[in-house]
Image (spheres, rainbow, N blue to C red):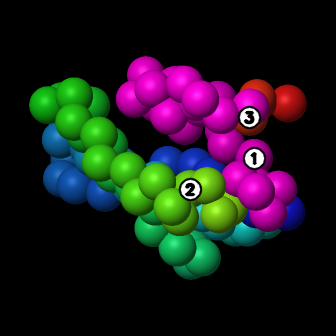
Amino acid sequence: MVKLRLKRCGRKQQAVYRIVAIDVRSRREGRDLQKVGFYDPIKNQTCLNVPAILYFLEKGAQPTRTVYDILKKAEFFKDKKITLS
């Protein structure tokens, strides 16, 4: 099963996160299938690759709670019928 989750990058005390599609059995810093976005909580910036995210969601990938909240805040689900299960 594939999940959309955060992968930590950046320096100590200055974390930035990549939103990645990754196998459930992989650890947080493990090998990802594809990078689909970027999130900086300090500057509150989000950059999303919408076609890639849609592709993985259509294939059955489940976003984690945090990624779901980031996508919801970016109004990703505004006209789509996708919910967190």
Of labels 1 and 2, earlier in sequence is 2
Mark nearest the camera among 1 and 2 is: 2
Residue 53 tag number: 2
The image's mark for residue 12 is: none
Residue 52 image offset from top left, x and y in percent: 53, 64
Where is residue 27 shown, x and y percent of the image? 64, 62
| Residue 33 in the image, given as x and y percentages of width and height | 60, 76
**In which quadrant is the C terminus drawn?**
top right
Who comes first in sequence, dot 3 or dot 2? Answer: 2
Mark 1 closeness class: few <14, some 14–19, many ≥20 residues within 10 Å: many
Q: Secondary structure at mark 3?
A: loop
In this rendering, the count of numbered labels is 3
Could you tell me which secondary element the residue under label 2 belongs to? helix
Viewer-closest of 72 and 2: 72
Q: Quadrant of residue 79?
A: top right
Classify mark 3: residues with Cα within 10 Å, few (<14), some (14-19) or many (20+). few
Magenta part of the chain: 57-81
Q: Is residue 70 visible?
A: yes
Give the Cα separation between the discs numbered 3 and 2.
Answer: 12 Å
**Residue lying at 45% horizontally and 26% vertically, measured from the top left:** 75
- Left or right: residue 70 versus residue 4 is left
Q: Mark 2 belongs to which amino acid?
A: Ile
Q: Indicate the amino acid at tag 1.
A: Gln
x, y percentage for residue 60?
82, 56
From the viewer's perspective, tell me whether residue 49 is left or right of residue 58.
left
Q: Which residue lies under the disc numbered 1?
A: 62
| CB under 8 Å between discs 3 and 2 | no
* Residue receiving disc 3: 82
Tell me the residue at 58%/49% (across/down). 5
Query: Alpha-carbon distance for marks 1 and 3?
Result: 10 Å
Q: CA distance from mark 1 to mark 2?
A: 10 Å
Q: Which amino acid, by three-letter code, is at mark 3?
A: Ile
